[in-house]
Amino acid sequence: MYMNNKTTPVPVSNDVQKDTDFEVRVLDTVCVNESQRQHPWWHNLKYLAAGMLFGIILVKSEMISWYRMQEMFRFQSFHMYGIMGSAVLTGIIAVWLIKKFKIKTIYGEQIEFHPKQFNKGQIYGGLLFGLGWGMTGACPGPIFAQIGTGAVVGLVILGSAVAGTWVYGLLRDRLPH
């Protein structure tokens, strides 16, 4: 039996081919921790504010600088490693605190963590992501910050990221998961 997005059992007989895409996505955070509450449209403004604050932090910390990216990939500077390392450490501590004290969302809903299985597709995806990151100096978050600062080339990077996502969607069934 498998669970669908509404977490109800879906019977699978031996004659039916398993939905491998479903198996890969079944424990995605959106499937497990999605809030069931409905809010008015203006509740989304908090996400806009958080995104703007994140963008300002990216700009001020020079995380959107192509030159900083090149320094990192050439091992010429610790700047980017320090920022990313502190972000990872902050995430580790936050997850540990959530688990230890059973912290709930601001709406009182429980947060669940599920182990993820490693697969070879993560290696290929990581290599492609790193190649694109090294060439453009931008990963998904900084693309929007670059565009927001007036770096028009960010639009080309964004278009390429969208095209890559579209190609992945077309080829997903034939790729290793």
Image (cartoon, rainbow, N blue to C red):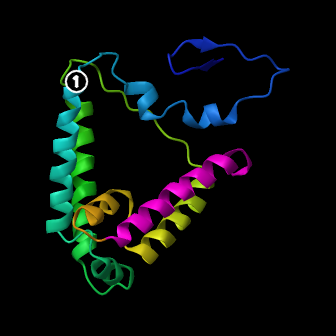
Horizontally, residue 118 falls left or right of residue 176, namely: left
Is residue 118 inside the magenta stretch?
Answer: no
Residue toward you, 174 or 1: 174
Mark 1 lies on residue = 104
Q: Residue furthest right?
A: 15
Q: At x 20% / y 27%, what residue is drawn?
A: 43
Residue 28, image x and y in percent? 47, 34
The boundaries of the magenta stretch are 152-177
In percent of width and height, residue 123 lies at 57, 60
Q: State the image quarter where residue 86 is shown.
A: bottom left
Query: Where in the figure is residue 38, as x and y percent of width and height?
Result: 29, 16
Query: How many numbered markers are drawn?
Result: 1
Residue at image location 50% in from the left, 72% down from the top? 131
Asked if residue 107 lies left or right of residue 151, the reply is left
Tell me, yes or no, whether the highlighted magenta stretch contains residue 158: yes
Identify the main secondary structure in magenta: helix
Q: Secondary structure at mark 1?
A: loop
Report x, y in % for residue 165: 54, 52
Answer left or right for 131 relative to 19: left
Mark 1 residue crowding within 10 angstroms, few (<14) / some (14–19) / many (20+): few
Residue positioned 68% across, 35% down in the render: 20
Reply above or below: 130 against 78.
Answer: above
Residue at the image position 66 percent from the left and 17 percent from the top: 1
49 or 82, which is in the foreground?
49
Quadrant of the image occupied by residue 32? top left
Taking 124 as reference, is 118 above or below it? above
Q: Amino acid at mark 1?
A: Lys
Q: Confirm whether residue 102 shows in the render.
A: no
